[in-house]
């Protein structure tokens, strides 16, 4: 029996992709020398000026692990390029090299965090290879750390939306009563049709307690605004008729909405998703609070405003409300976000 984990005769195993080093120097011989010496370690890209180096970074930053730049070049110093990379592509490990004793610029770059290492010319090739091996290893660790943070961020984003949907249900139930035809499904349907971008608060700068506290205060303020606007609607329009619904929405939404005769066209989809997707520290607008208040006002009368994607965009139409949500239905909605 052949062990499937072993390479078969005549079959090539896929080669592991090499990382990329960008080397910038105005001396053509230095570029050739560096490329020949370092090509066994990584793919080597080269540029002969700071401006060309910036263009190479902008075009290939996703694949560049290490940036090595000479310091003294015509027109600009290398630490300007390293600063450019530091501002825009902080995942790239930055190394400064020069044949001159320019400690003022070097110390400045080190103190500002623009460079990982300073290497004096002429190079000791063995030492240079070791420095670049360490730099490539550091770049890999940074990428792995960034990937873990991205995965953690995605989990927290899903948790944030799920918690906000739960808050939304609690708010609607407290205002309309659990026995009423709750407008949560109409709200979530409209938000899903509009498209929700997961919220991105500064989670890396906030511990969990701060995050929960910030979300609680944000939701409370939103709930108070919704309650106030719902009471105002009930006072101004206490009857059972819902024919004036579009006329109620138009003045509040303004240029973000248009009456198309029997239906309404939403010109700004963010007005329908704000509570779910805005960052933790950003308050929810009164326009969005009125949107939920109007759905609650309709729900108390057994009606809803259904939003669908039409030829002209997001179109809303007043319809009979669906039965109240069950826990299973709400869980199914949460899974879709």
Image (tube, rainbow, N blue to C red):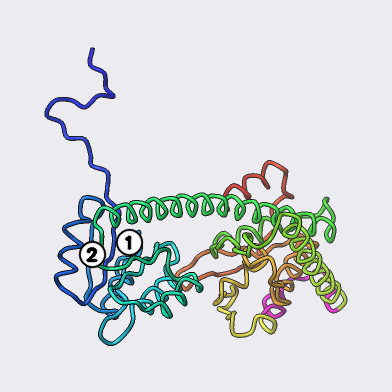
Question: Which residue occupies the foreground of this view, 102 or 145?
Answer: 102
User: Residue 36: horizontal and vertical position, in percent?
Assistant: 16, 58
Point 39% across, 50% down: residue? 137
Point 68% across, 65% down: residue? 280
Name the image quarter holding residue 315.
bottom right
Point 18% across, 75% down: residue? 27
In the rendered structure, are the residues bearing label 1 and label 2 in contact, judged by CB atoms less than 8 Å apart? Answer: yes
Name the image quarter holding residue 246.
bottom right
Q: Residue furthest front?
A: 101
Q: What is the distance, in whole Å, between disc 1 and disc 2 at their CAs?
A: 9 Å
Point 60% across, 74% down: residue? 262
Q: Secondary structure at mark 2?
A: strand
User: Residue 334: horizontal and vertical position, in percent?
Assistant: 63, 49
Q: Which mark is residue 45?
A: 2
Q: Which residues are magenta?
A: 236-249
| Residue 57 in magenta stretch | no
Mark 1 nearby-residue class (10 Å; few <14, some 14–19, many ≥20): many
Q: In the rendered view, does 44 fall on the left or right side of 284?
A: left
| Residue 245 in magenta stretch | yes
Q: Residue furthest top?
A: 1
Q: In the rendered view, does 241 fall on the left or right side of 123?
A: right
User: Residue 173: horizontal and vertical position, in percent?
Assistant: 81, 55
What residue is disc 1 on?
Answer: 64
Mark 2 nearby-residue class (10 Å; few <14, some 14–19, many ≥20): some
User: Residue 52: horizontal and vertical position, in percent?
Assistant: 26, 77
Mark positioned earlier in the residue sequence (1 or 2): 2
Question: Which residue occupies the foreground of this view, 44 or 123?
Answer: 123
Question: Which residue occupies the foreground of this view, 221 or 289?
Answer: 221
Q: Secondary structure at mark 1?
A: strand
């Amino acid at each position: 029996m052949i062990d499937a984990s072993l390479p078969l005769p005549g079959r090539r195993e896929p080669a592991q992709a090499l990382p990329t080093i960008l080397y910038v120097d105005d001396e053509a011989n230095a570029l050739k020398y560096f490329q020949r010496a370092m090509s066994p370690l990584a793919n080597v890209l080269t540029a002969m000026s700071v401006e060309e180096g910036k263009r190479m970074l902008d075009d290939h930053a996703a694949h560049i692990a290490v940036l090595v730049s000479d310091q003294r070049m015509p027109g600009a110093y290398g630490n300007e390029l390293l600063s450019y990379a530091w501002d825009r592509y902080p995942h790239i490990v930055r190394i400064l090299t020069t044949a001159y004793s320019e400690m003022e610029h070097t110390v400045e770059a080190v103190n500002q965090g623009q460079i990982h290492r300073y290497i004096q010319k002429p190079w000791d090739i063995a030492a240079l290879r070791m420095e670049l091996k360490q730099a490539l290893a550091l770049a890999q660790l940074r990428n792995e750390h960034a990937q873990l943070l991205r995965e953690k961020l995605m989990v927290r984003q899903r948790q944030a939306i799920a918690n906000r949907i739960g808050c939304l249900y609690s708010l609607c139930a407290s205002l309309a009563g659990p026995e009423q035809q709750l407008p949560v499904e109409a709200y979530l349907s409209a938000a899903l049709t509009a498209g929700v971008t997961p919220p991105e608060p500064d989670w890396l700068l906030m511990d969990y307690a701060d995050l929960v506290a910030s979300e609680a205060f944000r939701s409370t303020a939103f709930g108070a605004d919704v309650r106030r606007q719902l009471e105002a609607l009930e006072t101004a329009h206490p009857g059972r008729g819902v024919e004036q619904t579009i006329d109620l929405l138009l003045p509040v939404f303004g240029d973000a909405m248009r009456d198309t005769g029997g239906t309404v066209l939403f010109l700004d989809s963010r007005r329908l998703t704000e509570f779910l997707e805005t960052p933790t520290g950003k308050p929810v607008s009164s326009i969005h609070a009125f949107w939920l208040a109007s759905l609650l006002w309709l729900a108390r009368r057994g009606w809803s405003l259904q939003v669908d994607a039409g030829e002209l965009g997001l179109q809303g139409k007043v319809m009979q409300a669906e039965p109240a949500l069950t826990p299973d239905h709400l869980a199914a909605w949460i899974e879709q976000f």
